[in-house]
Amino acid sequence: MLQLDIEKALAPWRTASGWRIAFSGGLDSTVLLHLLADLAKRELLPPLSAIHIHHGLQAAADAWPAHCQAVCAALGVPLQVIHVQVQPGASIEQAARSARYAAFGEALAHGEVLLTAQHRDDQAETLLFRLLRGAGVRGLAAMSGQRVLGQGTLLRPLLGVSRSMLETYAAEHGLSWVEDPSNTETQFSRNFLRQQIVPALTARWPQATASIARTAAHMAEAQGLLDELAAQDLADADRLTEFAWLGLSSLALAPLKDLSPARQRNALRHWIAPLTRLPDSEHWAGWDSLRDAGGDARPIWRLADGELHRAEDRLWWLSGAWLKPLQGALAWSAPGQILELPGNGQLQLIGEIPTGDLQVRYRQGGEVMQLPGRGHRDVKRLLNERGVPVFARGRLPLLYRDGQLVAVANLPGLDASADDSWRLRWCAPTNDQSLS
């Protein structure tokens, strides 16, 4: 039965460039590894290998890589052991998980599939845990069966299988595995649910974990419908802007304001989910303030991994380099080459290189620029005329020659010489890196 379940779950992935098993050495991943190694003896599969993540959080774990190596050697499966550094934080469980999946993502090559051994009981625990935290539909969908990870895909082929089925398989095949001592420590929320709450539920309702896992599947389907609605609602708002060269995610505000508050939140959850950890219910008051601020206001909604700005009737997502301070003026000693702007992308002169002492600066206020046929013009007024988003104005590179402002990067009419013999081009920083 178990063999048939996993063969069915993995059937769409037979053409992957490789199957990599997340192998902790515990019961669940040991069964998964044994199942796949046995299947590989009978059928042609993608190259099979295992990955063991060593967190270094407890002394007992130091012996696990050797155990995993022995198991893999006996089955003829190559093993990669990766040591990670777990960052301290409020939740050691979450910190370890983040470090583990970051390592998995880096280890996956293009087209590879990472197979993890979470099962139906794990799914039920996840839903209960998130329910107690007040999660919405997306959270109550619990663990997805698959998702993108690094250059490959994370796949959970055992979500429909109970832990008791894994225990039966392990006993029938005489498998050995390691036991994590921390699994008995009920100060960890998941352990408390696993050891005290779930047994009490199943004692009263034997099918409790199956029913809860089924609810997670219903929530996942409901979330899929909400995502479809969000995509429709975002279609008008996701129109191009003349400042697309900033390379930032942005939305037109007006189409969103026409939606009901619930649909606004649903659309924004869908849009920001790939960008940041989603805010809790109370924190959504920040969206109301951002949406309803006066036309002259410059509201900001600060989220876990960045900020949502409102400028020129659009929403703009800023993170990474965009939220870090800039350095001062830079001398451009080799204007024929691309100039790396610390924390602010790259700058290039295209065309005939102008002579003179060239320097790159950022706005400080009061800058004036000489324009053909228009005389001296205030830079602030020029930026207002072109509708440059306020948050970007202080990052626009200004080119000075012999102390005179001669160009503002990327703005037509301001970014080139009078005879158009050269042009100043700025490649803005990405949200996640200092350079594009």
Image (spheres, rainbow, N blue to C red):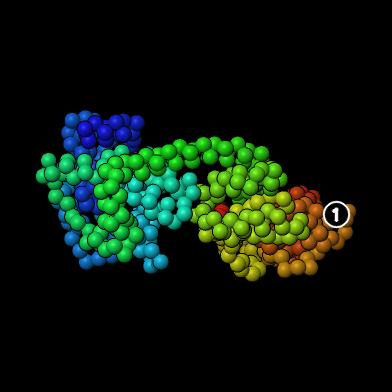
Name the one closer to the observer, 85 or 205.
205
Q: Quadrant of residue 114?
A: top left
> Amino acid under label 1?
Pro
Tell me the crowding category of disc 1: few under 14, some 14 to 19, or many 20 or more residues within 10 angstroms, Cα based: few
Compared with 153, 58 (above or below) is below
Compared with 380, 24 (above or below) is above
Q: Mark yes or no: residue 39 visible.
A: yes
Q: Quadrant of residue 21?
A: top left
Q: Quadrant of residue 155?
A: top left
| Numbered marks: total | 1
Q: Residue at x 11, y 44 (%)?
A: 174
Quarter that holds the N terminus: top left
The percent coordinates of residue 282 (x first, y second) are 56, 59
The percent coordinates of residue 392 (x first, y second) are 67, 58
Q: Residue at x 42, y 52 (%)?
A: 131
Q: Mark yes or no: residue 397 visible.
A: no
Q: Is residue 83 left or right of residue 31?
A: right
Residue at the disc numbered 1: 372
Name the one closer to the observer, 219 or 385.
219
Q: Is residue 354 left or right of residue 21?
A: right
Q: Residue at x 40, y 46 (%)?
A: 142
The percent coordinates of residue 9 (x first, y second) are 31, 34
Q: Residue at x 65, y 55 (%)?
A: 288
Name the one closer to the observer, 140 or 267.
140
Q: Residue furthest front?
A: 204
The percent coordinates of residue 315 (x first, y second) are 65, 51
- Element marked by disc 1: loop
